[in-house]
Image (cartoon, rainbow, N blue to C red):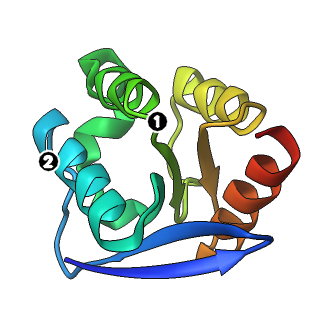
Amino acid sequence: MTIHPITKNGVTCAVIESDAPVITDVGSALDVLMSAKYEAGTGNIVIAKEQVTEDFFILSRGLAGEILQKYVNYGGRIAIYGDYSHYTSKPLRDFIRESNRGRDVFFAATKEEAIDMLTRRASAGR
């Protein structure tokens, strides 16, 4: 895993790069957050959907809720980017839509969009 800090609108984001999933459970998700805070000085995480275990996107398993609650508790924010068009779950589509209306969790199509969501919302709301 490599962390690349990017600053936009005065807000720093930690862009996570990896060839394999780095968020596979609650512990690894917290490791990513703490690494970003240590290496990039920020709790704003930008990560590709492929770097997050598929179990995260099956809401009935509860992993997304556990991870996102920990992130909020530890001052983290996350934007996950990728293609969500193949998901047919209405609860997941609703979750993505509602998350994008908030300030801490975002789902975007591209890395640039993910960075924009974290930096725009952070500068406007915090």
107 displayed left or right of 66: right
Give the residue drawn at x 62%, y 33%: 93
Vertical side of 70 occupied by 79: above or below: below
Give the image quarter of residue 61: top left
Q: Amino acid at mark 2?
A: Ser
Q: Where on the picture, by quarter, is residue 58? A: top left
The one nearer the camera, 68 or 125, is 125
Q: Where is residue 75 drawn, in percent x and y? A: 46, 36
- The residue at which mark 2 appears reads as 28
Task: Examine the rendered structure and indicate whether residue 11 appears above or below residue 15.
Answer: above
On the image, the x and y values in percent for residue 86 come to 51, 52
Number of numbered discs: 2
Q: Closer to the observer: label 1 or label 2?
A: 1
Q: Quadrant of the N terminus?
A: bottom left
- Vertical placement of residue 67 versus 23, above or below: above
Who's the residue at 62% across and 36% down the image?
96
Q: Position of residue 30 (x, y in %)?
A: 22, 43
- Residue 114 shown left or right of residue 56 in the figure: right
Left or right of 62: which side holds 48? right
Residue drawn at x 45%, y 74% is: 15
Crowding around mark 1 (Cα neighbors within 10 Å: few <14, some 14 to 19, many 20+) is some
In front here: 48 or 1?
1
Circle 1 SS class: loop
Q: Quadrant of residue 38?
A: bottom left
Q: Toward the viewer: 71 or 123? A: 123
Q: CA distance from mark 1 to mark 2?
A: 16 Å
Q: Which residue is mark 1?
A: 75
**Residue at coordinates 31% horizontally, 31% vertically from top-left?**
67
- Secondary structure of the residue carrying tag 2 is helix
